[in-house]
Image (cartoon, helix red, strand yellow):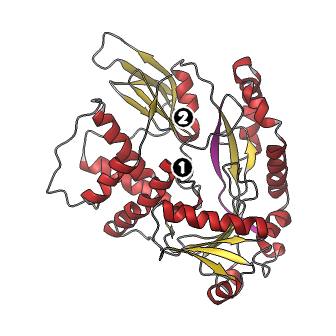
Amino acid sequence: MHTSSRNTGKVHAPFIYDPERKKVWAKAALYGYDFWKKYCYVNKISFIEDGVIEVAVDAKSEKALSLHHQWGIKNGLDDTDIKILNEREISRIEPNLRCPAALLCKKDASVNYGQITQMLADQVCDKNKLVRMVTCAKVVNIKYKETSKQPIVLEYLDVLEKSKKELNCNFLINASGSNSINILNKTKIDHFYQDLFFRGEYWVAPPKYDNLTSHSIYSVPQFQQFPFLDPHWIIRSNGKREIGPNACPVLSPYGYDNLANAKEFLPKMYRLMIKKDRMVNKTLFKRELFDLVSKEALSSISKRYMINRVKRFLPIIEPKDFKIRGTAGIRSAIVDKNGNFVSYPIFILQRDILHILNYNSPGATGAFPISYAIVFKLIDKGILKKYKEDKSDTNNPFDAKLINACRNEININFACL
């Protein structure tokens, strides 16, 4: 009901990831496509291979298209998967699209990640009765009992029963998304990272635009130094067309409304201003971020302004036709001690706890490859024992070649604080 369902629903291709600086992201997206395609086919879940078009609206973004094409090839896409289009080629594929150049990538798909997440949970619990899902719960503390066989004690509040409970374990993985730093802070480990939250909002297109395009349409981001995309034209797995998301700053990982943000205003301001976190001030007062925030906030306030950002390349759409808001989602971004946005995932191994920070886009796309890579790394370190493969298990749709690619090509480094 949170991040898994509040997203664009795209299985992203790896052409927007720098093969040197974002190699982990790129490989996770490359293999994630094949993982989800196989998983959805076996489980009879919709996997729509609809492709994506990235458009250039000026000379500067045309250069970016050429770079993205190079990145896509270096990241493992085939020449048949990705292609630069001129204006005439664009008009043949998408008659309603207006731009001087575009990048067509066929290896891009649409799914319902909320549906997938529910099925994964059901399968894990049905297959192995040792697995228990705890929901409607909030972690309140993490302690250590040095003399215990299971030294890690996780205290959590059961929201439904309104009671505090405990879980004991000998190894813990913190993969809590936008709450990962909150969980890290429960361990009292000193660190210099801080999180900022951004709400992505959508507008649902009316039925009259259902046949406007056959592809989702993205534009080259104006602020490429930040981890956000400009609003784009989205075709969801259910066939609905939407415009979004923007990146409106909020104060909470659950800041979907003004009340949730108001509750977090004073605590968040305090965390931003205390001495050890003052590097965030360097971020907040950067001219480029101020320009970005101003534009995204205006998109949140003004429907017309947001729709017009897409109207640049789909001139037929009119803001007055968009009357229904889509489902908003929130993503977190990590800022380092110099006030810069971190462009890569962070894996911190400390006292038998693995903390996964800044794992955002392509988060859902790369979930399987990243998970396999983490497990292999933990096996290599002797933290996990390799299980004996069950040859009779017909529910595993993944072949050895795909799984081994995660081990050999996704190089995860564990940092220690």
Q: Is residue 290 left or right of residue 28?
A: right
- Where is residue 391 drawn, in percent x and y? 14, 55
Label 1, on which residue?
Answer: 20
Q: Nearer the viewer, residue 208 or 312?
A: 312
Q: Position of residue 364 (x, y in %)?
A: 49, 54
Task: Tell me if residue 121 can be seen.
Answer: no
Out of 298 and 400, give the one closest to the viewer.
400
Callouts 2 and 1 close, C-beta under 8 Å: no
Magenta stretch holds residue 332: yes
SS at circle 2: helix
Residue 234 position by quadrant: bottom right
Q: Is residue 393 visible?
A: yes
Q: Residue furthest top?
A: 147
Q: Mark 1: which amino acid?
A: Glu
Instruction: Count the marks.
Output: 2
Reply above or below: 150 against 124.
Answer: above
Q: Residue at x 25, y 42 (%)?
A: 129
Judged left or right of residue 229, residue 34 is left
Q: Is residue 48 above or below residue 372?
A: below
Could you say whether the residue bearing mark 1 is in a helix, strand or loop? loop
Q: Amino acid at mark 2?
A: Ser
The answer to whether residue 216 is magenta is no
Residue 93, compared with residue 304, is above or below; it is: below
Marks 2, 1: nearer the viewer:
1
Q: CA distance from mark 2 to mark 1?
A: 26 Å
Other residues around mark 2 within 10 Å, as few (<14) / some (14–19) / many (≥20)? some
Q: Residues within 10 Å of mark 1 (few under 14, many from 20)?
A: few
Number of the label disc, if any, that sits on residue 180: 2
> At 31% from the left edge and 41% from the top edge, which residue is drawn?
376
Read off the magenta span: 322-336
Q: Position of residue 122 (x, y in %)?
A: 35, 52
Q: Main secondary structure of the magenta part?
A: strand
